[in-house]
């Protein structure tokens, strides 16, 4: 045992007396600097994130000439609070809790009347940080609309966006049409109601123009 301890001590003394071994030099390949001008930054019109982070109301379709105010306008000055949006669901309290968990950010709204046709457009923005809530909201809206409508048509260029027409009349005996699509973190909702049947092409035209404006 003493021999083992003595051997360890001798080895430590020899090691301690040696000059420190220098570390190998750090080396990295030399990266040549790129030549030419840097690409120009995207304009606000091209940068989708810049658009969606700006005034959400600017992304709404403008009310057409000759249209009148909605009988019961939604929101205030084009904005819709989370509680006001939740009130549009069958179970507002549950919808409010769901919106909180889905990281609801804000909502913009526009509505008007063209003769007997009522138009309401809502843009709902989520933070989409912990989960892609905007896609989940789109899937849920289209699931319910698909079960209640008689016909659906894809919104060209929008991926999974669709227009739904031909469903049962609402409680007031009005015809309805709906459209849903998503761009980035913003969910588009289009709602039409009328005393007369709503042409699928009319609903599709509005939905496509709104999606393209986003």
Image (cartoon, grey):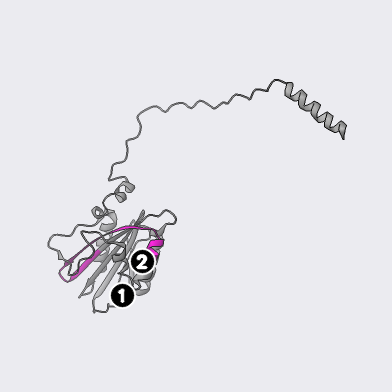
Residue at image x 34%, y 34%?
A: 39
Residue that protrudes farthest toward the front in the picture: 2
The foreground one among 111 and 201 is 111
Q: Which residues are magenta?
A: 97-120
- Label 2 SS: helix
Q: Is residue 131 magenta?
A: no
Q: From the image, state whether disc 1 or disc 2 is nearer to you.
A: 2
| Residue 138 appears in the figure | no
| Of 12 and 25, the residue lying toward us | 12
Q: Name the residue carrying label 1.
A: 167
Q: Earlier in the sequence, mark 1 or mark 2?
A: 2
Q: Position of residue 74 (x, y in %)?
A: 23, 65
Which residue is rendered at x = 38% and y = 73% of the image?
147
Q: Which quadrant of the figure has residue 200?
A: bottom left
Quadrant position of the N terminus in the picture: top right
Horizontal and vertical percent for residue 10? 81, 26
Q: Which residue in the structure is indicated by mark 2?
A: 96
């Amino acid at each position: 045992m003493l021999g083992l301890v003595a051997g360890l001590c001798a080895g430590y003394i020899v090691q301690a007396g040696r000059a420190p071994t220098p570390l190998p030099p750090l080396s990295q390949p030399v990266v040549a600097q790129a030549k030419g001008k840097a690409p120009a930054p995207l304009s606000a019109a091209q940068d989708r994130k810049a658009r969606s982070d700006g005034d959400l109301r600017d992304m709404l379709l403008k009310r057409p000439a000759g249209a009148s105010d909605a009988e019961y306008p939604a929101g205030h000055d084009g904005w819709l609070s989370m509680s006001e949006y939740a009130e549009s669901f069958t179970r507002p309290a549950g919808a409010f809790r769901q919106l909180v968990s889905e990281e609801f950010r804000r909502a913009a709204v526009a509505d008007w009347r063209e003769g007997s046709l009522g138009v309401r457009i809502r843009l709902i923005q989520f933070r989409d940080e912990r989960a892609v809530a905007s896609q989940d909201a789109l899937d849920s809206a289209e699931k319910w609309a698909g079960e209640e409508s008689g016909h659906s048509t894809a919104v060209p260029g929008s991926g999974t966006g669709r227009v739904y027409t031909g469903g049962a009349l609402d409680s007031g005996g009005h015809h309805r049409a709906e459209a849903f699509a998503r761009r980035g973190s913003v969910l588009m909702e289009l709602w039409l109601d009328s005393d007369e049947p709503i042409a699928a092409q009319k609903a599709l035209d509005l939905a496509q123009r709104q999606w393209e404006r986003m």
